[in-house]
Image (tube, rainbow, N blue to C red):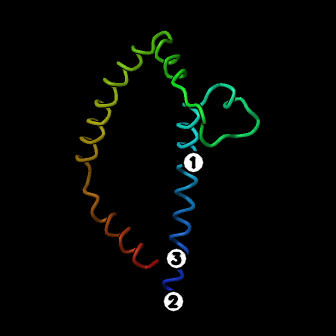
Amino acid sequence: MTSRAFRRSGWNLVGVALFAVMVFPVFWMISTAFKPDDQINSLTPTWFSRSPTLHHFTDAIHTPFFWSSVKNSVIIEPTRLIVTLTSASSRAPSSPACSRADSISKRL
């Protein structure tokens, strides 16, 4: 292997490690949502629940103001997206920035 291949392999390893660090909290949040209370409060972590439950979801749905919060999110998020996209498209084109990033990545 050439030194460039070793360097590329090193960067790929760094990318996989960063991906694992970034995805782990999302995995933990989703897996905890389906765990019963005794597994959540246990001192030893369990990666996957042997007896998944939907109890926490039913509790969340039946809390006061849950559906009004959902309604607000359904209204606010598309509005935010539209405002962001229109403001981004009205700015100067970003093609020089993209080409610079492309040339930097080719040197790695």
| Alpha carbon distance from label 3 to label 1 | 22 Å
> Dot 1: few (<14), some (14–19), or many (≥20) neighbours within 10 Å?
few
Q: Where is residue 66 shown, x and y percent of the image?
A: 45, 15
Labelled disc at residue 24: 1
CB contact under 8 Å: marks 3 and 1: no
Q: Most extreme residue toward the right, as rendered?
A: 43
Q: Where is residue 87 shown, x and y percent of the image?
A: 27, 42
Task: Label 2: state its secondary structure.
Answer: loop
Q: Nearer the viewer, residue 50 or 79?
A: 50
What amino acid is found at the position of numbered circle 3 in the picture? Answer: Ser
Q: Is residue 97 left or right of residue 2?
A: left
Q: Write the residue at 54% across / 20% down.
A: 55
CB contact under 8 Å: marks 2 and 3: yes
What amino acid is found at the position of numbered circle 2 in the picture? Answer: Met
What amino acid is found at the position of numbered circle 1 in the picture? Answer: Phe
- 93 to 4, vertically: above or below: above
Q: Earlier in the sequence, mark 2 or mark 3?
A: 2
Q: Write the residue at 58% across / 41% down.
A: 28
Q: Where is residue 56 shown, x and y percent of the image?
A: 54, 22
Q: Nearer the viewer, residue 77 or 21?
A: 21
- Kindly identify which residue carries mark 2: 1
| Alpha carbon distance from label 2 to label 3 | 10 Å
> Dot 2: few (<14), some (14–19), or many (≥20) neighbours within 10 Å?
few
Q: Is residue 68 left or right of residue 60?
A: left
Q: Write the residue at 59% across / 34% down.
A: 32
- Kindly identify which residue carries mark 3: 9
